[in-house]
C-alpha cells in the first residue's frame, strides 16, 4: 500500500517536518513494514514561466522547433544588456529556450527547468547550443517530471487547473516535493489497504483521537428507496454455503459533464498511490477506493439493461475482461450481469467478474452523462478463487480477498457520488438501492489475566480497554477482570480472544515485551523410526554412497522407460491439480523413477563412477476415494468421524530408500584395477541393512521391472511383506535412461522394515555359559531356497539356538537328480546352565525333524 504523506495529513495531525524514515520505523513497530520509499526526484531551479514570444523555425532535418522567450521571474531572467543569443532580445527580461512541442502559445504559463536542475533519472540540465541558438533551460513535459507518460506536449498549467507567477517554485506547485511510503500489508489486515486504515494506525500509534471517515455515523449516507435501480442477487452455487454477495448498494448520478477533467490534485494523489489517471468518473471511483478501502464500479446507464443480476457462471460460459482477454468461466465464478433490453438495445450480458474486473460493454466513456455506482460486499473466498483461477489480480480483488468492511458500501457510494457532483456537475438521484443488511457485530469475552499471561506484561484493565478502543473496538466491563469486546466491522481477522490479545500486544508496543529465553525441556530422544533411518543412512554413506534429493514429480513416459507392465500398481499415480510443470504432473510411486535423473546428470558432467542414494516418500493411490476429500473452513475443528474421512482421503506415502551404482564399485588405484559394480553388491547392501536393524530376510529370485530377470533378487521379511528388490537393471532400461550398461540398483520399503520385530532385543543379562555346536547336512530339493530351510531349522531348534550358519553347498553325482546338500552349523547356549551334549543333540534332531516334515529333508550321512 502506497501512502502519500500529504494525503495522510488530511486525516491525522502529521507535522510538516516529519522525518519519513523515522515514520517508516514507527509503522514497522505496528506491523506495517516499509517496502519502498518514494522521495523527491527533482532538484534545482524548476519554476513557473510565461511564454512571451515564440518563433517556429524549420530545419534541414525536417523538424520544426519553437524558439521561445520565457519570463522565468526576475531572479532567473537574463539581463537586457547581456543576452546569450546573438539575435536581438526582447524588451523585457527573459530566457531563450528551444522547445520541440507545439501545444502552447504566447501567454501560456509553463514549467521551465533551468540550468543546474536535475530531473528523474539523474538527468542534469545545462545551457547548450542547438539549432543555432543557446537554449538556456528546458520547457518540461509530464513524463520528464515523472508526472505521467504523456510526452506529446509540454505542461500548460491552465490545462491542469493551476496558476502562478513567473519565478514561482514549480516543485511545490506540482507536488514534486512530496514523499510516499510503500508499506507491506499482511493478508489478514485488508483494512490497511486504504488511507482510512493507515490513518487509524497512525492515530493509534501517536495517541491521537481518530474520526472515522468511513463510518455511517459520521458520513452522510442515502436511505434505501423503492425506486432504486433494480438489483437481484441469485447465487445458486455458494461456496461453503456462504453467499458470494451479501450486500449491494447502488446510487444513480445524472447530468455529468463528459468533458470534465480530473483535477490535478486528484491525478497527483492517484499517481503517488501507484495508479494511472484514466477519466474523471473512473478516477473518482479509484480515489474513493484508495481513501476508504471499498472498491466501486461505475456503469454507463445508457448501456445497462433494466436490472443488475449477481449470479454464478455456467460451466463453459465465456467473458472478455477489460484487459481484452477472453476467459472461460467456472461455476464458482461470481458474475455481475444485466437483464432486459437497455436503451442501447443490449441486454442479458455479463458486465463483470464480481470483485475482480469488469468488461468493456457498459464502461463509462467520453460520452457518458448518467452512471450507476456499485458498492458491493463480496465473499473473500469466492473472489480469491476467481482471481487465482484466472490469474487476474486487480486493486479490487486484492481488497475483497482480504476482507472489506461490510458496513462501508453505503458510505463509499455516497462519497463517490458527492465527488462526481462536485467535480463533474452532475445530480445525485434520491433513488437508492440497498440489498442485504450488515452482519451483527461480533462480541468476544476477554479475561484481562489471560492477556498478561500470554504476552508477559502486567496490563491493567484501563490500559487494555484503551488499547482496544484505539483500534475501534467497543469495550464493556461485564465482570471482575472480564471484558466484553465488540469487534469493529472492518476487523474480519479478529475471531477469538487470542486475536484481541495480539492487538493489545501490537498496539501496546512490541518493544515492551521482554525477551526471555525459555528453559529447554528434556527431550525423549530419537524415535525408533528416526534411529532406523539414521542407521541405514550411515551404513550407505560408509559404503561410499552419496545422499541426494530429487523432486517427487514424474510422468507416464518414465514408467515406459522403466518398462513397467500395463497393470503394474506403480503406474497408478496421483495427478496434481496444479503441477509445477505440465511435463511432470504425477507423484512418483518409486524413488528410482526420479533418482535416475540425478545419476544421468552427474554422468553428463564428467563423473565416471557414481553411487547415489535417496531417502524419501513415494505416493500411492491405493484405497483412495474416487472424488475429492472433505473440505472445512479455516478455524473449524473436525469431529473424530470427519478426521477419519480426512485421513482416508490422504494418499498412502511409504518411506523408501533407493540407491544406484553406475561404474565401479571398487575404484582402481595402486592397489589394483578396480571392480565394476555387480548385482551381488546391492543385494549384499540390502541384506546388511536388514541385519543392521536386527532382521532376517529371505532372498528369492524374481522377475520385476526395472531389474534384469536373471540378475536380481526379492527380499521377503518374516511376516511375508516384501522389503524390496535389488540387482542389475534391465539392459533396455539402461538404454532408455542413458545409463551405463550393467548399472545396479536397489529400492526398499522402510515402513515394512519398521513393522518387524527387532531380533536383537533380549531381556535379562547375557549368558556367560559355554556354547555347544552341532553340525548337520540335509538333502533337499534343488529349488528350495537356503533361507527358507534355515528359517525352519531355527524354528524347530528352539530358543537356545544362538547362531545358525550355512557352511557348505554340494551338488553332484552322489546325490539324486534335482537334489542338493546343505550343511549347517547350529550354535546353542543356555542362559542359566551349561548345555549337555545330549541336550544339544535333541535340539538339533528337533530342528531336522521339522525340516523333514515341511520340506522332505533327509539327513546326509
Image (tube, rainbow, N blue to C red):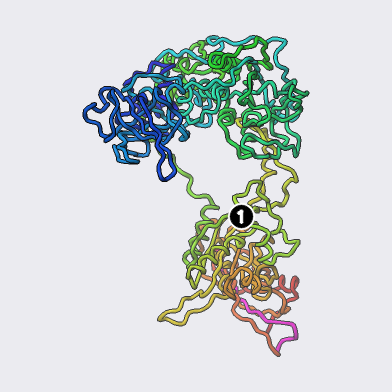
Q: Position of residue 206 (x, y in %)?
A: 38, 18
Which residue is the extreme one toward the bottom? 813
In the image, is residue 621 above or below residue 536? above
Task: Please indicate whether residue 137 sits to the left or right of residue 243 in the image.
Answer: left
Identify the residue at image location x=25%, y=34%: 84
Say if 624 sits above or below 299 in the image. below
Q: Front-most of 444 and 353?
A: 353
Residue at left 57%, top 70%? 682
Mark 1, Cα crowd under 10 Å, few <14 / some 14-19 / many 20+, is many
* Residue drawn at 40 percent across, 42 percent down: 59
Based on the picture, tell me whether residue 821 belongs to the magenta stretch.
Answer: yes
On the question of residue 113 being in view, the answer is yes
Q: Which residues are drawn in magenta? A: 814-830
Is 665 drawn above or below residue 377 in the view shown?
A: below
Percent of width and height locating residue 667 = 46, 76
Find out whether residue 145 is within the magenta segment.
Answer: no
Label 1 belongs to which residue? 553
The C terminus, quarter of image:
bottom right
Q: Residue at x 65, y 79 (%)?
A: 822
Q: In which quadrant of the rendered view does residue 117 lie? A: top left
Residue 491 visible in the displayed image: no
Q: Residue 34 sits in which quadrant?
A: top left
In the picture, measured across the screen, residue 222 lies left or right of residue 605, that is right
Amino acid at each position: 500500500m502506497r501512502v502519500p504523506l500529504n494525503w495522510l495529513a488530511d486525516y491525522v495531525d502529521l507535522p510538516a517536518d516529519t522525518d519519513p524514515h523515522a515514520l517508516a520505523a514507527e509503522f514497522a513497530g505496528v506491523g506495517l513494514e516499509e517496502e519502498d520509499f518514494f522521495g523527491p526526484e527533482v532538484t534545482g531551479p524548476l519554476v513557473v514561466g510565461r511564454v512571451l514570444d515564440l518563433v517556429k523555425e524549420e530545419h534541414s532535418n525536417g523538424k520544426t522547433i519553437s524558439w521561445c522567450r520565457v519570463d522565468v521571474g526576475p531572479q532567473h531572467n537574463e539581463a537586457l544588456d547581456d543576452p546569450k543569443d546573438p539575435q536581438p532580445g526582447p524588451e523585457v527580461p527573459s530566457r531563450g529556450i528551444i522547445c520541440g512541442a507545439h501545444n502552447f502559445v504566447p501567454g501560456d504559463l509553463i514549467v521551465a527547468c533551468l540550468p543546474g536542475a536535475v530531473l528523474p533519472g539523474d538527468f542534469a540540465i545545462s545551457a547548450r547550443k542547438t539549432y543555432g541558438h543557446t537554449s538556456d533551460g528546458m520547457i518540461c513535459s509530464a513524463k520528464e517530471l515523472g508526472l505521467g507518460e504523456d510526452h506529446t506536449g509540454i505542461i500548460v498549467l491552465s490545462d491542469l487547473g493551476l496558476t502562478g507567477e513567473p519565478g514561482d517554485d514549480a516543485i511545490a506547485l506540482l507536488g514534486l516535493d512530496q514523499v510516499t511510503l510503500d508499506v507491506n500489508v499482511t493478508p489478514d489486515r485488508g483494512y490497511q489497504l486504504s488511507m482510512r486504515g493507515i490513518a487509524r494506525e497512525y492515530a493509534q500509534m501517536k495517541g491521537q483521537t481518530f474520526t472515522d471517515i468511513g463510518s455511517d455515523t459520521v458520513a452522510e449516507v442515502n436511505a434505501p428507496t423503492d425506486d432504486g435501480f433494480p438489483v437481484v442477487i441469485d447465487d445458486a452455487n455458494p461456496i461453503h454455503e456462504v453467499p458470494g454477495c451479501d450486500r449491494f448498494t447502488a446510487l444513480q448520478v445524472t447530468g455529468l459533464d463528459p468533458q470534465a477533467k480530473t483535477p490535478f490534485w486528484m491525478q497527483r494523489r492517484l499517481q503517488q498511490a501507484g495508479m494511472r489517471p484514466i477519466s474523471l468518473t473512473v478516477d473518482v471511483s479509484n480515489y474513493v477506493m484508495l481513501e476508504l478501502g471499498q472498491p466501486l464500479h461505475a456503469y454507463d446507464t445508457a448501456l445497462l439493461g433494466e436490472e443488475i443480476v449477481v449470479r454464478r457462471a455456467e460451466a463453459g460460459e465465456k467473458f472478455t475482461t477489460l484487459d481484452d482477454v477472453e476467459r472461460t468461466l467456472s461455476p464458482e465464478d461470481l458474475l455481475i450481469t444485466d437483464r432486459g433490453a437497455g436503451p442501447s438495445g443490449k441486454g442479458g450480458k455479463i458486465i463483470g467478474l464480481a470483485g475482480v474486473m469488469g468488461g468493456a460493454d457498459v464502461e463509462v466513456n467520453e460520452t457518458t452523462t448518467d452512471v450507476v455506482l456499485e458498492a458491493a460486499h463480496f465473499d473473500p473466498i469466492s473472489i480469491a478463487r476467481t482471481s487465482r483461477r484466472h490469474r487476474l489480480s486487480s486493486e479490487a480483488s486484492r481488497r475483497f480477498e482480504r476482507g472489506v468492511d461490510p458496513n462501508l458500501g453505503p458510505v463509499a457510494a455516497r462519497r463517490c457520488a458527492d465527488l462526481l457532483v462536485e467535480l463533474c456537475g452532475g445530480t445525485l438521484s434520491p433513488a437508492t438501492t440497498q440489498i442485504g443488511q450488515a452482519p451483527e457485530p461480533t462480541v468476544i469475552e476477554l479475561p484481562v489475566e489471560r492477556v498478561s499471561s500470554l504476552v508477559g506484561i502486567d496490563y491493567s484493565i484501563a490500559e487494555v480497554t484503551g488499547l482496544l478502543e484505539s483500534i475501534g473496538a467497543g469495550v464493556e466491563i461485564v465482570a471482575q477482570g472480564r471484558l466484553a469486546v465488540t469487534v469493529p466491522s472492518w476487523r474480519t481477522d479478529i475471531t477469538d480472544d487470542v486475536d484481541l490479545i495480539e492487538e493489545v500486544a501490537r498496539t501496546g508496543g512490541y518493544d515492551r515485551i521482554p525477551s526471555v529465553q525459555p528453559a529447554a525441556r528434556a527431550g525423549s530422544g530419537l524415535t525408533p523410526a528416526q534411529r532406523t533411518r539414521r542407521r541405514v543412512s550411515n551404513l550407505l554413506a560408509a559404503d561410499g554412497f552419496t545422499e541426494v534429493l530429487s523432486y517427487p514429480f514424474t510422468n507416464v513416459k518414465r514408467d515406459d522407460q522403466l518398462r513397467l507392465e500395463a497393470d503394474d500398481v506403480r503406474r497408478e499415480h496421483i495427478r496434481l491439480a496444479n503441477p509445477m510443470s505440465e511435463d511432470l504432473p504425477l507423484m512418483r510411486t518409486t524413488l528410482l523413477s526420479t533418482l535416475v535423473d540425478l545419476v544421468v546428470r552427474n554422468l553428463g558432467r564428467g563423473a565416471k563412477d557414481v553411487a547415489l542414494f535417496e531417502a524419501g516418500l513415494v505416493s500411492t493411490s491405493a484405497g483412495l476415494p474416487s472424488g475429492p476429500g472433505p473440505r472445512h473452513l479455516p478455524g473449524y475443528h473436525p469431529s473424530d468421524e470427519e478426521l477419519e474421512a480426512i485421513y482416508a482421503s490422504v494418499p498412502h506415502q511409504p518411506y523408501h530408500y533407493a540407491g544406484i551404482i553406475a561404474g565401479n564399485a571398487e575404484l582402481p588405484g595402486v592397489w589394483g584395477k578396480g571392480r565394476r559394480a555387480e548385482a551381488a553388491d546391492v543385494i549384499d547392501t540390502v541384506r546388511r541393512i536388514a541385519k543392521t536393524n536386527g532382521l532376517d530376510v529371505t532372498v528369492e529370485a524374481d522377475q520385476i521391472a526395472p531389474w534384469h530377470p536373471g540378475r536380481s533378487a526379492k527380499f521377503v521379511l518374516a511376516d511375508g511383506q516384501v522389503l524390496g528388490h535389488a540387482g542389475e537393471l534391465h539392459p533396455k532400461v539402461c538404454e532408455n535412461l542413458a545409463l551405463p550398461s550393467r548399472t545396479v540398483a536397489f529400492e526398499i520399503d522402510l515402513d515394512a522394515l519398521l513393522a518387524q520385530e527387532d531380533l536383537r532385543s533380549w531381556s535379562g543379562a547375557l549368558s556367560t555359559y559355554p556354547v555347544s555346536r552341532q553340525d548337520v547336512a540335509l538333502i533337499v530339493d534343488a529349488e528350495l531356497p537356503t533361507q527358507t530351510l534355515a528359517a525352519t531349522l531355527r524354528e524347530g531348534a528352539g530358543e537356545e539356538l544362538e547362531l545358525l550358519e550355512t557352511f557348505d553347498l554340494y551338488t553332484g553325482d552322489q546325490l539324486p537328480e534335482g537334489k542338493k546338500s546343505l550343511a549347517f552349523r547350529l550354535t546353542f547356549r543356555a542362559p542359566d546352565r551349561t548345555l549337555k551334549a545330549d541336550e544339544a543333540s535333541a535340539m538339533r534332531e528337533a530342528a531336522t525333524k521339522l525340516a523333514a516334515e515341511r520340506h522332505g529333508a533327509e539327513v546326509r550321512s
